Structures are given as C-alpha cells and as structure tokens.
C-alpha cells in the first residue's frame, strides 16, 4: 500500500502549490507535479556570482598560499561558486589541494554534498544547520585555531560565527562568493500576493530566507501587507528547514510544516504530502 509520501502516489491531486524557488525550480516543480499538484511558479530570488571577482579570487589565493587551521562552509552553493571562480582563474587543482589539507566544518548536508563532488569530506558538521549550530560545533573543536576562513551566504549576513572565532584569538578571513537578485519582476510578485489573498493557493513552499525577505519587501513597497497577511493565513506555509522556518516565524508568519531531519527538496515535498494529502 502506498503512503502519502510515496513518489508514485498522486496525493497532491487538485492542490495548488506556489513555488518561489529559482535555482532548482524545475526539480521542485517536477517532484510536486509527479504527486498531482498544480505548481504556481514564481521565482522570487535569483543567485549570481559576486560582482567582486578580485576579492573572491584573492580569498582563494590566500587559502592556497597561507596555512589555514579551519575553513567553514555555510552552503553548497558557496562551494560550487568558489570552484567556478577557481576554474576561471586556473586555480582548480590548487584550491582542491588546499581544501584537502585543511580541516573543514559545514553547516548542513548541501555543503557536504558539494565537497563530496570534489572527493572531499568535511571533518566537522553542525548538528543543527544554523549559525548557532556552527558555533556549537566550533566550540567542540580543539584550539588553537589561529586562522579561520569562512564562506558566507550573503555579504550582509550576521557575523556571529566570525566574532566567535575572533574572541578565541583567531584571525578570520571571510568571503561571499554569490549574491541574491530579483528573479521575478515586481508585478509578478504582486500578482502572487493577489493570488494568495484570493485563496487560490493550497500551500506555498519557501526554500530560502531571501525569498521570504523579497516577498515581505515587495508587499511593504506596494502597500500590500494586509493582502499578504490575509493570504498567508489562508494558505499552508512550508519551509525547507529551520533557518527558513525561523525567518518566517520572526516575521510573524505561521509555519505549518518543515522537514525534521534532511533539509532538502525531497523531504520538503514529503512534508507537503503529509500535510495536504488528507485534505
């Protein structure tokens, strides 16, 4: 007997699910459509290489040239983007060798998978894929750590982890190899808010903090906050993991489902099947 999470069971038949994802939009949409869902595609945020190529390449060169006691990866996207910069600078072999000899701490499964694609494995992993989880993991790593390199997921992110290492006497070298930009135009985002407010969406599946931030920013700029609030109250809200869930909660948005272990696309779809399959 099939279960609500079964890949062949069309348990989402008749459900309309809004997908703000951009980079893996087709992957997520396909997983949902296989289960019978009607997917409303509205990629809110795109990802692009950092425009500051010189700074990113200089970080890679420092990692290659200088002994580093630890390198921290927040995201798989960061690992992949750094490899792209290294390839264009003819530094691929040198970067891989530097990573192989340097202890590595990762925030979650995505940077772990990205390293595995390079035939590398992390030495340490956060138990919870958050900055707090990274700090907890770092506290268990034996000193001294005189130089720590950190890949950031945003130039504007909190620097709590960097501060943690500085307080322990380490020199910290950070890099943000990619930036977020708008993927859908403002009118498309406003139309999504209208569709949510009209009650025509069963669920919306958020896969990044930046998606939440873009939606809220546009609602504020277009004076659509009341419509967005009403729409989200009528719509089931799914988050891919605890970081996105916390961002939604901080904005006062109810989260109806979030995977409990692996924070990737397939568990997100499974959680949606479990949430909506009995409706």
Image (spheres, rainbow, N blue to C red):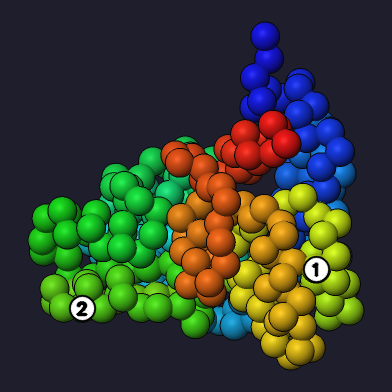
Q: Secondary structure at mark 2?
A: helix
Viewer-nearest residue: 222 or 156: 222
Q: Residue at x 46, y 64 (%)?
A: 246
Q: Which numbered tag is attached to residue 125?
A: none
**Is 217 placed left or right of 168 in the picture?**
right
Q: Nearer the viewer, mark 2 or mark 1?
A: 1
The quadrant holding residue 187 is bottom right
The quadrant holding residue 199 is bottom right
> Which of marks 1 and 2 precedes in the sequence?
2
Image quadrant in which the C terminus is located: top right
The quadrant holding residue 112 is top left
**Is 102 placed left or right of 60 in the picture?**
left
Q: Which residue is mark 2?
A: 166
Above-or-below relation of 88 to 186: above
Q: Residue at x 70, y 87 (%)?
A: 220
Q: Which residue is mark 1?
A: 197
């Amino acid at each position: 007997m099939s279960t609500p999470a079964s890949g062949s069971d069309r348990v989402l038949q008749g459900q309309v699910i809004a997908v703000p994802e951009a980079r893996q939009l087709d992957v997520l949409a396909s997983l949902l459509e296989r289960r019978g869902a009607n997917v409303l595609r509205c990629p809110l945020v795109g990802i692009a290489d950092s425009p500051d190529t010189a700074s990113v390449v200089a970080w890679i060169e420092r990692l290659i040239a200088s002994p580093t006691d630890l390198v921290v990866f927040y995201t798989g996207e960061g690992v992949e983007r750094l490899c792209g910069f290294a390839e264009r600078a003819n530094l691929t072999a040198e970067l891989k060798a530097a990573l192989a000899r340097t202890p590595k701490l990762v925030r979650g499964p995505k940077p772990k998978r990205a390293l595995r694609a390079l035939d590398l494995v992390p030495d340490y992993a956060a138990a919870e894929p958050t900055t707090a989880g990274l700090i907890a993991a770092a506290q268990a790593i034996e000193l001294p750590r005189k130089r720590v390199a950190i890949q950031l997921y945003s130039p504007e992110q909190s620097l709590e982890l960097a501060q943690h290492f500085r307080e322990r006497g380490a020199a910290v070298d950070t890099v943000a190899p990619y930036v977020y930009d708008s993927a859908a135009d403002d009118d498309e985002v406003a139309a999504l808010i209208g569709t949510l407010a009209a009650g025509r969406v069963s669920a919306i599946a958020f896969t990044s903090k930046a998606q939440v931030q873009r939606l809220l920013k546009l609602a504020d700029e277009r004076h659509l906050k009341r419509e967005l609030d009403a729409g989200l109250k009528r719509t089931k809200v799914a988050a891919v993991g605890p970081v996105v869930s916390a961002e939604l909660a901080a904005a006062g948005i109810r989260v109806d489902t979030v995977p409990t272990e692996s924070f990737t696309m397939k568990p997100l779809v499974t959680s949606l099947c479990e949430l909506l399959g009995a409706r």
